[in-house]
Amino acid sequence: MLTIHLLGHSYLDKDGKPVNASLKAVALLIYLTLQRRPQHREHLAELMWNTPDALRNLRVELHRLRHLDLDLFPSHQPLLEATLPTDLDRWLRDADHLPDSRLGEWLSQGSGLPLSGLEDLGSTEFREWVDSQRWVITQEVEAAFSRVYARSVQNGRLAAAGLIRARAEQLGMQLHITPVPSQPTGSVKFERTELTRRFRHLLDRARETPQLVILSGRSSDGKRELIQGAVAGSDWQALQMQASAHPELQRAAFLHQLLRLLPPERHAEAHALLAQPGSQEEDLVRAWTLVAATGHPLVIAVHDIGQATSFLTASMQFAMNLPSSLMLVLSPSSAEGQHALRDALGTLDRSRLHHLELPALAVHEVMDAVSERQQLLSADQRRAYATRVVQQSDGLDLHARELIEADLDLPGTRLPLPAGVCDALLGQLGGLPPAFRSALARLSLMYGPLDVAVAHVLLGADAPAVLAQATALGLLTTAAPEETVRMPGLIYQVSDLEDGLCFASELLRVALAGTLSSSERRELRTLLAAHHLALQPALAWYYAARAGLSELAAQARAQLPAPADFPAAPVSAPAVAPARRAADPSQHETGGTVTARTERRTSNGYRVATERGQLQILRNGLYASPPLLRLVWPSVPAGNWDMVARLDVQNSAPELERPNSSYGFAVRVGSGPQVVYTQRSTYELQSGQQLGAQVPLGCWFALAGTGDGGPLELSVKSLDIALTIAAWRWNGQTLLPLKKAGSAGHLAGPAALAG
C-alpha cells in the first residue's frame, strides 16, 4: 500500500519501504490528497512550476511515477485526482487507542515540522498553500496531544501525562484542556513568596513602560508556576510558551495563545497572519500590533531558550518600545544561554532589563505545600519528610511534586527516578545533536571524577571535544576532592587548578544512564573495570561485579586493602555518649533572625543554604567515594559550645569507600582534632579524628563540647546528606541562627536543649 508522509520530512513509502520519487512528485500527490477534489492539469503545472514549459514538466513527473509502478492517473485525462492514505491519518487513529508502551514512538512521530522539505518548491501560491496546510496539520497534532493528555490525566497515568506535557511545551504547543480538579496532578503548589513579591514589583513598573526579565533557574515547572501565581487575582494575563527552533512554529504558538485575548473584530487579522505569513520583519510588526490591541496588561514568557536567535532578539527589541503594559520574560535553558541573551540584548535600556533566579525548593516551601496532607504526622515527621523530598528531588519542582503525589514513605534511601522526571530532563537536551547526547550517556556510567583518560576509554578520539562542549554548556563542571565555603557569607569559588569533571546534575546523569541498553552498560562497565584495575581496585571491582565479570572482579578484590588496616571504632562504645534529643527550636525563635533564603551549590552537588537563619547542607550525589566539604568561620574564642541540629539523610557508597571514611558531619577548631558525628553504628577513624557521638535520624538533637580558640571548621563528607543546624553557640558567641546586622540575638534558651 502506498502512503504519503506529512509529519516531518515529506516522502512516499510503499509497504513500509521508501519510494524513490522526486520531491516534486511527492508535492503533487500531497496537494491532490489534501485538496480532496480533482484538479486541472494546467492548474497543477502552473502551481508546481510556474514556467512556460510547466505542462511538459508535469507530464515528465507523471511518466516517472508510472516507471515506479505507481500508475495513479489515467492517460490523457484533463483532471487529476488522488486520495492516498497518509501517516497523519494513521497517527490520529492511534491517538484513540494508545498504550503507554507506544507513547514515546507516537510523540516522536508527531514532533516533526509538517510538510518539511516543501518550503522552497513551486510557485508563490504553492508555498503559501504549504504554510496554510502546515498550520492546519499543526492544529490537528496539538488537538491530538490534548486528547491523549486529558485521557492520561483522567486515568491517573501521571508519568504519561508528564511526558506529553513536556513534549508539547518543547514544541511550543498549548494543551487545550483543564485538568480535572479531583485528579492529583498539579494539586501540589509551591509558594515562593519572596520571589513572587519581587516579580509583582516589576509588574507594577511594567504598567508604565515595558520591562524585560531574564528568569534563570533549573526548574521549568517552577518558573511557569511563579509567573502564573504572580498574575493570579490581578488584571494581568500571562502567555507562556516553549522556545522553538522554528520561528514559524514559535509565531503560530504565540498567535494561538493571543487569540483568546483579542476582541472578536481582530480575530480575522490573527488568522490571516497564521495562514498567510509575510516577511519576518512584516510579521513581527503585525504580531506585536495585535498584542497592543488586546487591551490587557500582558506577561509574555518564552521558556527553555537554547540560543538567542535574531528573530527572538528583534522581537524583544521591538516590543520594548511599545506603548503598552507589557512584561517580557525570557527563560534560558543553560548558563551559556543566559550569557548569550544578555549579550544579544545589550542595546536595551539597562534600567528595564532585570535578572531573577528561581531557587531550588526550600524545606519550608515543601512543608507548606503538604501541610493539609500531613496533619496527622508529628512535627518531626513532617520536617523529616519535607527535607527528604527536597534532598532527593535536588530542589526540582517536578520531581518533588511526583514524590509527593506518589504518596510514598521516604525513609532517606534512594528511590528510582520517575519516568516523567527522566523525560523532562532529557527533553532539555532535545536541541543537541544525537551523537553528542549519546556521548553524554556513555560518560554517565563513570562513578567518579571524569578526566580525559577515562573519557577516552568511553569515547575514543572524540573525548576532548565532547568534554569541552559539555563544559561550555554547563552540563559538566569541575569536581574537586575538597571544597570550601566561607561563613557566614556562604562565599564559594570553584578552583581553577582542578581538571577533574562531573555532571552538574546528578538527576540528569541518572536519566542519561537510563537511555543505555543493558548490553551497552555491560560493555562500558567492562572497559571501565579494566581501566581502573591497577590504580582504583574498589572501583574496578564494582564495575566488574555489575558487569558479571567474575574473574576480573576477583582480581580487583584481591588488590583491596585488608579491613584490619583500618581499625573500626564503634560509635556505641561507652566512651562515646549518644546525642540527646532536643525540642523543636522553632518554638523558641527570637527576633532579629535573617529570614531570607540564600543558597550556594558547589560543583560536587553540595547545597549549602541559610533558611530562616538556620544552616542546611543537602546533597544527592554521584554513587562514589564522596568529596569533602568544609564550612569555615574566621575565629571563635576558647570555651564551651552547644548545638541544636538534625540529620534526616546520611547515605554512603560502602563498596567504593576504602576505608569507609564518610560521615555525617565533623567539627574542628584551630589545630585540635576533628570530632566526627555520624548516625552509623561503626566508623573507621582516620588520623587526627576522634568520635563525638552517634546521632539519630529524623529528629532534633543537642550536642555540647569544649574547644580551643581559633578558626572553626564544620565539615561534611557523605554520598547523600540532609543536615540542618538550627542553633550553634560558642562561648557566648552566636554562630547560628544567623542574625541581622546590628541585632542582639542569643541562641534559643535552655528549653531548646532539653532532652
Image: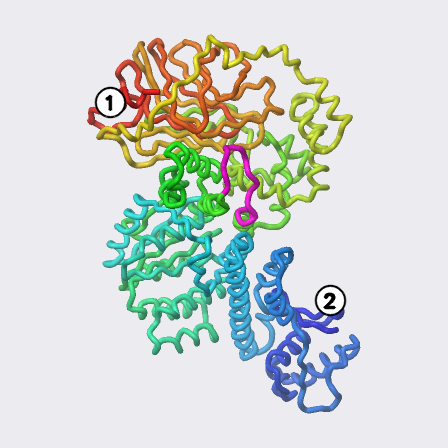
Where is the N terminus found, in terms of image quarters? Answer: bottom right
Q: Amino acid at mark 1?
A: His
Labelled disc at residue 18: 2
Residue 221 rendering spot, x and y as whole percentages = 44, 50
Mark 2–mark 1 Cα distance, whole angstroms, equals 78 Å
- Asked if one can make out residue 415 in the rendered structure from this viewpoint, the answer is yes
Q: Is residue 650 left or right of residue 323?
A: right
Helix, strand or loop under label 1:
loop
As drawn, 666 above or below 522 = above
Residue at (33, 36) in percent of width and height:
597
- What segment carries the magenta color? 408-422
Sort mark 2 into few (<14), some (14-19) or many (20+) by Cα contacts within 10 Å: some
Residue carrying label 1: 746
Q: Main secondary structure of the magenta part?
A: loop
**Is residue 413 rendered magenta in the image?**
yes
Using the rendered view, name the quadrant where residue 258 is placed.
Answer: bottom left
Residue 737 rendering spot, x and y as whole percentages = 30, 26
Q: Amino acid at mark 2?
A: Pro
User: Mark 2 or 1 closer to N-term?
Assistant: 2
Labelled disc at residue 714: none
Front position in the image: 53 or 702: 702
Residue 439 rendering spot, x and y as whole percentages = 63, 42
Front position in the image: 595 or 280: 595
**Is residue 502 rendered magenta in the image?**
no
User: Are the two marked residues, 2 and 1, in contact with CB atoms closer than 8 angstroms?
Assistant: no
As drawn, 318 above or below 680 = below
Residue at (50, 14) in percent of width and height:
572
